Image: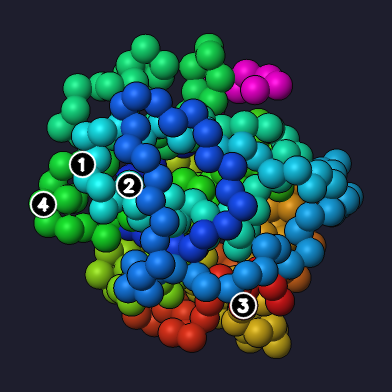
């Protein structure tokens, strides 16, 4: 790491998976299961051969964020032997696929270590990451890393979260690469950070596993998402189980942008990519919001009162794909 940043994104999400590519996989340790090549359609593979994410390789904006790198971040995978072979296979499929669909470039950092293990193992990477657990991109005095501690019960009950969490955390790595303020922790608006990540993982799971994560796992929308939405700017807000309320607000913003004659895929891209590329910060994010979406934050919050706090009222179209979103 070129610099040490002590950032913790505490994530309580649930599910994700996909393809083969020129992904740089290194740091296979003695406690790691070797990578297998997966070609099963049922596992969520993407057979496309393009290796781009639209026009995101080079971008300069008026908020001091310059994205010009064409060199990909190296993800050093440390996958513990406590994880089932099926999960390990899908882990590499998902990373390969996402690194093709939304490649992470070295605009703000060069490498990211990933530590994955089954929760039934006793902190197998404690010498590298201390007591870090759960799912996060977090750090200590040795640098930054991604943690994927997969609960044992998710294998027992075949929870989709055992896969979707990979996509969720990968999306945070993408956010870090396109926004220096997100990377440094100077942008911490929860619903605009976690909402897009959770929407991203849900679209991925629906597209590649034929599982509607929106309905089954992000359906616990709190009433305050429509009556007092500003509380979800803060990470300590309640009523956001599995980021359901943040997802709801993100998808409601999609609906409002469609009313302004944006296509659905373009509206989602504006939220998950264009907004972060403008490098919002704690001090100016509301101004950036209005510049990107042509809606003020207060106007958007006011519009939420016309919605029912029900995820079914804002779910995006079933034919929506990540390729369509990022290649538009």
At 40% from the left and 19% from the top, the residue drawn is 129
Q: CA distance from mark 3 to mark 4?
A: 34 Å
Q: CA distance from mark 1 to mark 4?
A: 9 Å
Q: Is residue 241 left or right of residue 316?
A: left
Tell me which label, 1 or 4, sits earlier in the chain: 1
For label 3, the SS is: helix
> Up-down: is 327 above or below 22?
below
At 84% from the left and 46% from the top, the residue drawn is 68
The residue where tag 1 is placed is 151
Please tell me whether mark 2 or mark 3 is closer to you in this view: 2
Q: Which mark is residue 156?
A: 4
For label 2, the SS is: helix
Q: Which mark is residue 161?
A: none
Tell me where residue 166 appears, x and y as whole percent. 41, 49
Tell me which label, 3 or 4, sits earlier in the chain: 4
Tell me where residue 111 appears, x and y as whole percent. 62, 31
Q: Is residue 118 left or right of residue 101?
A: left
Tell me where residue 196 appears, x and y as whole percent. 52, 59
Q: CA distance from mark 2 to mark 3?
A: 28 Å
The residue where tag 3 is placed is 324
Tell me which label, 1 or 2, sits earlier in the chain: 2
Task: Assign the N terminus to one quadrant of the image.
Answer: top right
Tell me which label, 4 or 2, sits earlier in the chain: 2
Tell me which label, 2 or 3, sits earlier in the chain: 2
- Image quadrant where residue 126 sits: top left
Tell me where residue 34 appears, x and y as whole percent. 37, 40
Crowdedness of circle 4 by 10 Å Cα count: few (<14), some, many (20+)? Answer: few
Q: Is residue 161 visible?
A: yes
State the extent of the magenta-drawn residues as a range: 1-7
Crowdedness of circle 2 by 10 Å Cα count: few (<14), some, many (20+)? Answer: many
Q: Which mark is residue 88?
A: 2
Majority SS type along the magenta span: loop
């Amino acid at each position: 790491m070129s610099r040490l940043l002590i950032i913790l994104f505490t994530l309580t999400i649930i599910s994700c998976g996909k393809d083969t590519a020129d992904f740089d996989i290194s740091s296979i340790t003695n406690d790691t299961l070797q990578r297998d090549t997966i070609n099963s359609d049922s596992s969520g593979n993407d057979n496309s051969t393009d290796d781009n994410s639209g026009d995101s390789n080079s971008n300069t904006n008026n908020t001091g964020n310059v994205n010009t790198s064409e060199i990909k971040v190296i993800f050093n995978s440390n996958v513990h032997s406590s994880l089932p072979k099926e999960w390990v296979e899908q882990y590499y499929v998902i990373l390969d696929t996402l690194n093709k669909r939304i490649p992470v470039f070295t605009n703000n950092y060069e490498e990211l270590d990933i530590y994955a293990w089954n929760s039934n193992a006793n902190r197998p990477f404690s010498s590298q990451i201390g007591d870090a657990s759960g799912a996060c991109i977090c750090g200590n005095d040795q640098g930054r890393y991604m943690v994927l501690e997969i609960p044992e019960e998710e294998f027992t009950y075949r929870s989709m979260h055992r896969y979707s969490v990979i996509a969720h955390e990968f999306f945070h790595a993408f956010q870090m690469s396109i926004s220096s303020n997100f990377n440094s922790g100077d942008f911490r608006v929860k619903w605009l950070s976690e909402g897009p990540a959770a929407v991203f993982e849900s679209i991925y799971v629906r597209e590649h596993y034929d599982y509607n994560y929106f309905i089954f796992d992000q359906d616990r929308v709190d009433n305050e998402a429509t009556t007092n939405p500003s509380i979800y700017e803060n990470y300590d807000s309640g009523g956001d189980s599995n980021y359901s309320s943040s997802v709801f607000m993100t998808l409601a913003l999609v609906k409002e942008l469609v009313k302004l004659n944006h296509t659905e895929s373009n509206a989602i891209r504006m939220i998950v990519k264009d907004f972060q590329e403008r490098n919002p910060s704690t001090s100016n994010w509301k101004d950036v919001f209005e510049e990107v979406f042509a809606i003020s934050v207060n106007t958007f919050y006011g519009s939420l009162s016309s919605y029912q706090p029900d995820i079914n009222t804002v779910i995006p179209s079933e034919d929506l794909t990540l390729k369509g979103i990022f290649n538009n």
